Amino acid sequence: TALTDLRIQLKTVNGRMSVVKNRVFKKALDGKDFSSYEALSQYFKGPVAVIFLNQDIGAGAKIISKFAEDHESFSVQAGFYEETLLSDEDIQAIAKLPSKEELYAKILSSLMNPHRNLLGVLQAVPRNLVGVLSAVSKQLEQK
């Protein structure tokens, strides 16, 4: 089924999804001291699946957002990250962020660009000198 596919995709980013009984999950949240947990409990009405992401929340958010786009019956209600309640719009914004690998590539590229530019300048000096010497020698040969 589609939910099984979602579970498999979430496992690739070290995440998991569980369908929970609302009453049991609310009971689990009652013992927490954070007010955001109480705000989160308002979303537990009707069938609810809880998704846990252990490492890269960006990759998980991308998977969840794509799944929600492809399946109209699936909707993201809210999220919770480091004691902060996230709206659906927050999760969509996280999904649009570049992945860690993309950010690493951009940082590496920005670190290498000054070196490439310097190398281009340093190579241009001898190249231009050769061009000038070649033009002078052709000019002398014509005389």
Image: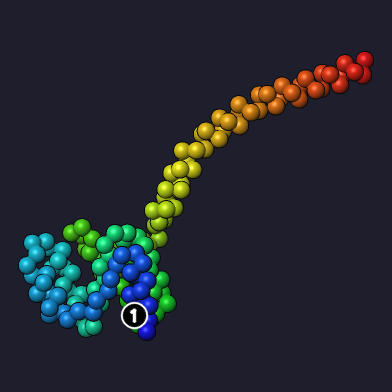
Residue occupying image coordinates x 23% and y 83%:
47
Locate residue 60 relative to residue 34 in the image: left or right: right
Q: Specify whether residue 32 is in view.
A: yes
Q: Residue 4 in the image: state x and y as whole percent.
A: 34, 80
In terms of depth relative to the viewer, which is nearer, 39 or 25? 25
In terms of depth relative to the viewer, which is nearer, 105 or 37? 105
Residue occupying image coordinates x 90% and y 18%:
141
Q: Considering only vertical position in the picture, is 99 above or below 77? A: above
Q: Which residue in the protein does label 1 denote?
A: 3
Locate residue 70 relative to residue 90 in the image: left or right: right
Locate residue 121 relative to residue 104 in the image: left or right: right
Locate residue 139 relative to residue 33 in the image: left or right: right
The amino acid beneath tag 1 is: Leu
Tell me the quadrant of the picture where the N terminus can be found.
bottom left
Query: Circle 1 — which element?
Result: helix
Where, by quadrant of the figure, is residue 143 drawn?
Answer: top right
- Toward the right, the furthest residue is 143
Q: Residue 136 in the image: state x and y as whole percent.
A: 82, 18
For mark 1, does the 10 Å Cα neighbourhood hold few (<14), some (14 to 19), or many (20 or more) residues? few
Count every numbered label the image shows and give the total.
1
Where, by quadrant of the figure, is residue 118 drawn?
Answer: top right
Residue occupying image coordinates x 14% and y 66%:
37
Where, by quadrant of the figure, is residue 71 drawn?
Answer: bottom left
Q: Residue 108 in the image: state x and y as whole percent.
A: 45, 43
Q: Specify whether residue 92 is in view.
A: no
In terms of depth relative to the viewer, which is nearer, 56 or 73? 56
Q: Considering only vertical position in the picture, is 77 above or below 125? A: below
How is the protein colored in the picture?
rainbow
Q: Residue 110 in the image: state x and y as whole percent.
A: 47, 40
Residue occupying image coordinates x 34% and y 80%:
3
